[in-house]
Image (spheres, coloured by chain):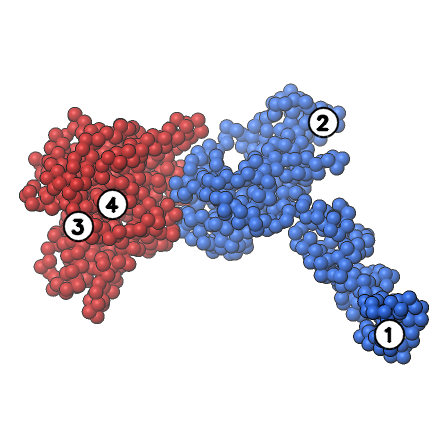
Amino acid sequence: MGGDLDLDVLTVSSARAAVQERQTTAATLVENFYSKIEAKDRQAGQINAYLNLTRERAFEQAKQLDAIVDRGDPLPPLGGVPIAVKDVMVTRGIRTTAGSKILGNYVPAYDCTAIQRLEQAGAIILGKLNCDEFAMGSSNENSAWGPVRNPRDLSRVPGGSSGGSAASVAAGTAVAALGSDTGGSVRQPAAFCGVVGLMPTYGRVSRYGLIAFASSLDHIGPLTKSAKDAAIILRHLAGRDVMDTTSADVPVPDYEQEIGKPVRGLRIGVPKEYFPAEMDSEVRAAVESGLKLLAEAGCEIKTISLPHTRYAIPTYYVIATAEASSNLARYDGVRYGYRSPNARTLSEMYRRTRDEGFGAEVKRRIMLGTYALSAGYYDAYYLKAQKVRTLIAQDFLAAFKEVDSIVTPTTPTPAFKLGEKSDDPLAMYLADIFTVTASLAGIPGISIPCGNSKDGLPIGMQILGRHFEEATILRVAHAFEHARASAGR
Amino acid sequence: MATAVSPDVRTKYEAVIGLEVHVQLLTVTKAFCGCSAKFGAPPNTNVCPVCLGLPGALPVLNRKAVEYAVRAAMALNCTMRETSIFARKNYFYPDLPKGYQISQYDRPVAEHGYIDVAGVNGATRRIGITRLHLEEDAGKSMHDGLPDSAHYTYVDLNRSGVPLVEIVSEPDMRSPDEAYEYLTRLKEIILYTGVSDCNMEEGSLRCDANVSVRPRGEQKFGTKAEVKNVNSFRFIREALEYEIERQIETVESGEKVIQETRLYNPSEGKTYSMRSKEEAHDYRYFPEPDLMPLVVDAKWQAQIRSRLAELPEARRQRMITEYGITAYDAGVLTATRSLADQFEEAARSAKNPKRVANLLQSEIMGRLKMRGLAIEQSPISMKGIAMSADLVESGAISGKMLKDLYDFAFERNQDFPAVYEQKKPQQITDTTTIEKMIDEVIAASPKQVEQYRAGKKTVAGFFVGQVMKASKGQANPALVNEILSRKLDA
């Protein structure tokens, strides 16, 4: 039973329907996903999206769900949907490493709120996904457990830091995945792997149990095959959590219903700063043709300006690294995780543990952030960056008086080759150039596939919206998917 | 060193002292999680992902801790800041699980307060309070006392996350005595607010002192040293004495005082250098991104203020007027809020509150002083004093008898009710004897009899009093009343 289900095309709602209508059982579905993971993900040279399979937990959940169906009761809204989660979200009793050697043996004592909520809604957690160490990176090459490969071209990176999340959805080894986005870490890999990636508004989804990189910029978001799947999952992730006092007490709409509304008359802004003369011609062409489709669907396209865009990368790297330098101080070898066996004094234990436990990029960012917060430099770096952050947010606020959403490319180029930028941190940082602005402003953004390069590599289009107006960007994304499908592109 | 400074040299210099006091708040739970904040639990039992600093855990601010901090700030005459900001203070230490302490930095919850302390010649000196801010405590490193202490340090994180307020004074104090007085007043005020037990042994009150010296008349401050972790007020006075002399000697010998942190060793009475300015931490403070700005608006402030108890100084003034006691005794009685409460409760329950105060002042205090006892150690409780006052008031016992009973109580270390039960005069219940006494009183008071018979029934009280007096309080009051009314109304 269920052996003939095509896992590649399974969506959130079709997976639930298949289990509900007994085309398959939840247990069989899980079994089939694990077979597929074993076949495509686990061998050397394969995708390497999964770090850890949570079989016991998945089959236990599947058993509960199958019992519901046995009784003839309706499944919960995400009932039977196999989902995988980035390894920066803690799972009780299940090793959680954040892609780092320093947490190589770490088994958390509690569950991340986002995972708890999805499981409560019936989702089945298949496993933990590879990522850049502590979510720091744009290629997934910074994982202590080896890089993830792009399912569309195994010689290329999947993007990062949620590379495993994007790759698992693109490879069909999960119906959907959770990632985290600090400067583009959901949207950029979604673009590279040709899937949908949503960064909700800051505060929309609880961060409790998300291993912190940069607290004021960290967001949990879904990676899916469609805007509709993202809409369904977001509804169950979103909402105030008493364990995260920065989570917002703003009503959560029924996004699935919202995305069905027409887009005719919506005003879409196209910021000129996101289309520099020297940009990749294929990316430009794909996004421009995407905009054409939106215009044909009745959207009003307007050129706008977000004048402080060019300061976004330095601003982001000051704030994110400053917060990271503090957030990562707890990995000191005292209470959990890796402790260097070679130390004789306390300070030596600290130095060696952190030197041996952290990878090069993490150490680079801790040093940058420590410097930015140091006495005598704080005003020039951290404080200045906070001021610029405000200006960038104001750019968006002003723009959103004129337009309802903003469309840009998600990334300057399609997926690059493994190793191509790993020795050049600055080039790597520029991979986030179009995504960090929304992170800094705290507004929601979604990346959806809008075309392919001549090498067949996916190209992503980013849609940004007002604070807490995820419904609008999901609606535009949904309409675009339909327009693109009917146009046959 | 530091004993050779002659009084002549000493008077050429002036000390400048500022104090940083940490007070642990008596909340049931910790500042940022739901764990118990109770002292004394087995190690690492009051802990959770938040106060252990586990990956992904986030702080949730305890409203009670805010209320207690604001209440303390109000009691210290501070100006409240409606919107204050939590900040991270970053440093590595094994008992600091997150690698940073959540504190407040450039926008603390309250600023610009003061405490008036007794200065020389009965004058008061106003010591400024720069700021009061809310923060979390760290855990405890246990270096000694365990079987394998030679090889390991253990960490107990029960205290990690317990709420503290740090109260920073202006550099307004000029002598160790003044610092001692400031601390005494500060502790008294905090105890009155009920937000802390200020127990120094359990670490719920901790003090660091900044001290420098300068030639008398000089406006500029000298280079300061910080003396840390002194665990009693007496030791702080001693540490400051030592430190001031050390610095004067340093300056006198033509050297420079070094800016540094020093530790006091109470058994030697000396301070030792712990780390220099160059080795000082750069705490890299920045706003805590996991917590929203703390807003204590006017409405919340008013609520907190309405729950603020009467403070010691105000209470002393009121008690002096209300009970006619001396300023000294008011001071003794208000030394703790519970003592003052006991006194006032007893006094107010008595027929004549002033008599309670008088007895306390004239009879109890002297006896305590003779025996070197503190008022808390008095065998006679406040309730006992109130009871005895009522007995004297009603004429049931004479003043002489009261003194005898008090002596007996102090001798036996028993409270007044017990002593009275053993020693109270036998009651006269023989009606013939009582009648005889009443007849004598009536015969001796023709004027009152006349008044009574003219309708002024309240005079009856006078007769009762006279009879009780004549019987030395031993006549059965019910019988006295009964026979009296029969005779007077006849």
In this rendering, position of residue A94 left or right of residue B28? left
Front label number (4 vs 2): 4
- Above or below, A464 relative to B194: above
Query: Is any atom of residue A44 visible in this view?
Result: no
Which x, y percent locates residue B308? 59, 49
Same chain for mark 4 and mark 2? The answer is no
Alpha carbon of mark 3 to alpha carbon of mark 4: how far?
13 Å
- The label number, if any, that marks residue B385 in the structure image: none
| Outermost residue to the front | B454
Residue matched to label 3: A260
Residue matched to label 2: B10
First in residue order: circle 3 vs circle 4: 3
For the point 31% across and 51% down, the residue is A251
Same chain for mark 3 and mark 4? The answer is yes
Query: Is any atom of residue B321 visible in this view?
Result: yes
Front label number (3 vs 4): 3
Alpha carbon of mark 3 to alpha carbon of mark 1: how far?
101 Å
> Quarter of the image containing the N terminus of chain A?
bottom left
- Crowding near pointer 3: few (<14 within 10 Å), some, many (20+)? some
Residue matched to label 1: B488
SS at circle 2: helix
Viewer-side residue, B129 vs B40: B129
Alpha carbon of mark 4 to alpha carbon of mark 1: how far?
95 Å
